[in-house]
Amino acid sequence: MEYSVHELAITGENPPAKYIYTDSINPSQDPSIPLPLLEIPVIDFNRITTPSVGTGAELERLRSALSSYGCVMVTNHGVESSLMDRVRLVFKQFLALPMEQRLKCQKEADGFEGFGSDMILTKDVAAAVRHFSCRLRLTTWPEDKRQMKYWPEQPHDFREVLDEYSSKLLVLHDATLRAMARSLSLDDDSTFLNAVREGGSISARFNFYPPCPTPDRALGLKPHSDGTVITYLLQDGEVEGLQVLKDEQWFRVPNVPDALVLHVGDHLEIMSNGEFKSPVHRVVLNPERQRMSVVIASFPEEGRQIEPLEGLVSGERPRLYRQVKYSIVDQVGYYWSGTRVTDDARI
């Protein structure tokens, strides 16, 4: 049933076997000892976009962080905390609607947009362990690609709030990719941005992770890297859940008030010739509390050839990746098989 995870959360029943891992998700970790907190770098977005004495140093901090961590906390990003709260609220209100209202936004079995569970693309679907989560995915840019039949009409201000938030994130997204290019001293700071602006797209993904009585045996999202250009994450604000793999160790990502988490995507890693790293991450569950998050992610045009930029390949820095063609179906396949396009593309 498409809404089984959400309905299970309402009834409080234990997850069925298809959501349960045979072994603990942390086989070598004492469950009584919490994982360490990631000392994730914090970047002042205003400093990397407003020319000043400290701009160069902040750009170098951005480059260094994305090279070693693949993710940063972004502050002073221009999105009001009140708007972020409204985004969380309208999704919470959507989840509280009667089933017949939510069914109006139900995704199709072989589709990507709408509310429900993620499509599973693997040779052995029956053996695949499902996420104990559900999501609402909506294309936000370009506007003529929006499929409004999936955009909730209730709560009454859902569309207005998402439109305002996605517009703010579009500005942030474009400025971020320009800053990334400048941090690598590229002559044209629109080089990364063109991979999205030339036929690509941006989507919002609202994630719901219900309480789970067996959080050591189920996951909200399995370990993966993002098959995106970049990803911006609005966290729950109260409940932790995001974890990042660094140096073969899982770390908890803290909730920083009013900050957004920026992740490098696999396709930006390839375009940067490995200067930026796409981090492996997962979402764990809480035994008592639900968690929500909102992702804004950008993607290349379907069929676009992705390869390292010429300005980032030299005798000192040889080409690390072959050319690959972007395909959303391939990206879903990588996710469910536990592989990465960056591994396939590695020379």
Image (cartoon, rainbow, N blue to C red):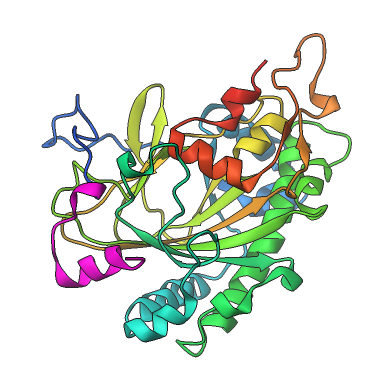
| Residue nearest the observer in this picture, 62 or 344 | 344
Is residue 34 at least partly visible in the picture? yes
Q: How many marks?
A: 0
Indicate the quadrant where residue 132 lies: bottom left
In the image, residue 102 lies at what x, y percent? 40, 79
Indicate the quadrant where residue 35 lies: top left
Decide whether residue 14 is among the magenta residues. Answer: yes
In the image, residue 97 lies at what x, y percent? 35, 84
Is residue 227 at least partly visible in the picture? no
| Residue nearest the observer in this picture, 242 or 134 | 134
Decide whether residue 213 is among the magenta residues. Answer: no
Q: Is residue 139 left or right of residue 200?
A: left
**Residue farthest to the left, as pictured:** 32
Q: Is residue 88 left or right of residue 165?
A: left
Residue at image position (85%, 26%) is 310
Q: Is residue 88 left or right of residue 28?
A: right
Magenta residues (range): 1-18
**Residue farthest to the bottom, as pictured:** 156
Q: Vertical placement of 223 versus 102: above or below?
A: above
In the image, residue 137 lies at what x, y percent? 52, 64
Residue at image position (49%, 30%) is 339
| Residue nearest the observer in this picture, 130 or 89 | 130
**Residue farthest to the right, as pictured:** 187
In the image, residue 23 lies at what x, y percent? 19, 32
Q: Quadrant of the N terminus?
A: bottom left
